[in-house]
Image (cartoon, grey):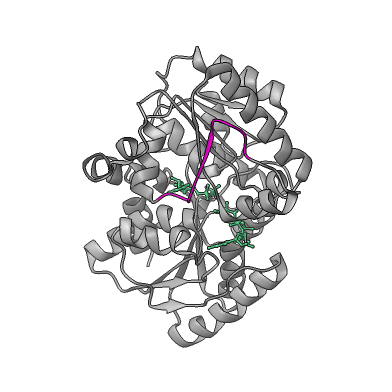
Amino acid sequence: MHVAVVLGTRPEIIKMSPIIRYCEELDLDYSLIHTGQHYSYEMDAAFFHDLELPKPGHKLNVGSGTHAEQTGKIMVGLERILIHDRPDVVLVQGDTNTVLGSALSAAKLNVDVGHVEAGLRSWDRTMPEEINRILTDHLSRYLFAPTEKARTNLLQEGIDGEKIRVTGNTVVDAVLQNIEIAEQRSHILHDLDLEPGKYFLLTAHRQENVDDRAKLENLIVAMQDLYSIYGLPILFPAHPRTLKRLNEFGLPVPEGVYVLEPQGYLEFLLLEKSARAILTDSGGIQEEACILHVPCITLRENTERPEALDTGGNILAGTEPKRILQAVSTTLSTEATWMNPFGDGQSGKRIIEVLLSDR
Ligand code: UD1
Ligand code: UDP
């Protein structure tokens, strides 16, 4: 069996890493294809380095662009490789343009698609990610749902239950495989002169938040208020999309907010683990906060990760300063005793074993 593992962005590199490691361990016939959707060192190569991943065998170098440009380039580039290599399965992860473009190319060539992290739904079709998820799920032969809720979503859309396996989310594998290494190797808290529990961690990159001037400005005001109330530094490893928008809109970063380059995985895991609370609109960071038992304030109106809300450790707060501050205050009085709902750290192995047993 030949498996083609396709990835293209930061979270895909992280969440595919346990699958890649397991393929290496089994000495499986697999190939690694990078679309190049993310390409800056700190969004791409830094993770291959931190996670000790092999170099991709193919690079499509699609880069940035509009949704149609990016998805189209991915389709054309991957089609060529698939016609030549004829893998048995194409594995994609998550909800990016890389995922949809790759799934479309594979499905049109009658190559089976395996979707890792299938069945997530925000029920908000204004999000590009929701469109990517739904279409990819319906193109897939193997749907690796992280939770029972995700399986239920798929069944409700009429997807054949035989195609669905609940495997847990590979993000748990990635956290468990790397947290101790991070603790041994990274000195980020010392380097930034931070004390555990004495800072907030902020990230924001969703198109609907940072491309909208009013929402981005609201987030900035919220951070200003947060600093004036608690006096704790707010660490902000900024996504390149967000930096670009802050500059374009001419929005200055307030006192107490420290803008950093996007961090490597080991550094970021430590920053998450020791934060007093995390404020984010990221999908993967909501999961990691939950796994690491750190309270999370989600800067969105909805989430495709309702399991995190159910633990009580994550609160949806949108982008209005008042609601964000209220959520921080609630969060700080919540005890972090919840159970991680996203899996046991064996998801990568389970996914490959499903493929091996089926062929
Ligand atoms: C993409 C995904 C999003 C995911 C995120 C992970 C889609 C539709 N969106 O969003 O779901 O949560 O990745 O981080 O697929 N840029 C750089 N260097 C890079 C990559 C991007 O400077 O390596 C800048 C460019 O200005 C680019 C902008 O960031 O235009 C946005 O990049 P893009 O890949 O289109 O979307 P993301 O916001 O990264
Ligand atoms: N991450 C990182 N460095 C950073 C910010 C995030 O290593 O500076 C990691 C984080 O630990 C998580 C993933 O990137 O595993 C989340 O990616 P992102 O927020 O870009 O995308 P999303 O999960 O929302 O698709």
- At which x and y percent is residue 320? 72, 28
The residue stretch that appears in magenta: 253-263
Q: Is residue 16 above or below residue 314?
A: below
- At which x and y percent is residue 93? 49, 57
Whether residue 286 appears in magenta in the rendering, the answer is no
Question: Which of the image's four quarters has the C terminus?
Answer: bottom left
Q: Quadrant of ligand 1?
A: bottom right
Q: Main secondary structure of the magenta part?
A: loop
Q: Using the image as rendered, state which of residue 92 and residue 108 is in the foreground.
A: 92
- Extreme residue in the bottom direction: 84
Indicate the quadrant where residue 45 lies: bottom left
Q: Is residue 171 above or below residue 133?
A: above
Query: Is residue 130 visible from the viewing direction of this image?
Result: no
Q: What residue is shown at x 44% (from left), y 24% (from top)?
A: 276
**Left or right for 188, reference 43:** left
Question: Which of the image's four quarters has the N terminus?
Answer: bottom left
- At which x and y percent is residue 69? 69, 72
Query: Is residue 284 visible from the viewing direction of this image?
Result: yes
Indicate the quadrant where residue 358 lies: bottom left
- Extreme residue in the top direction: 333
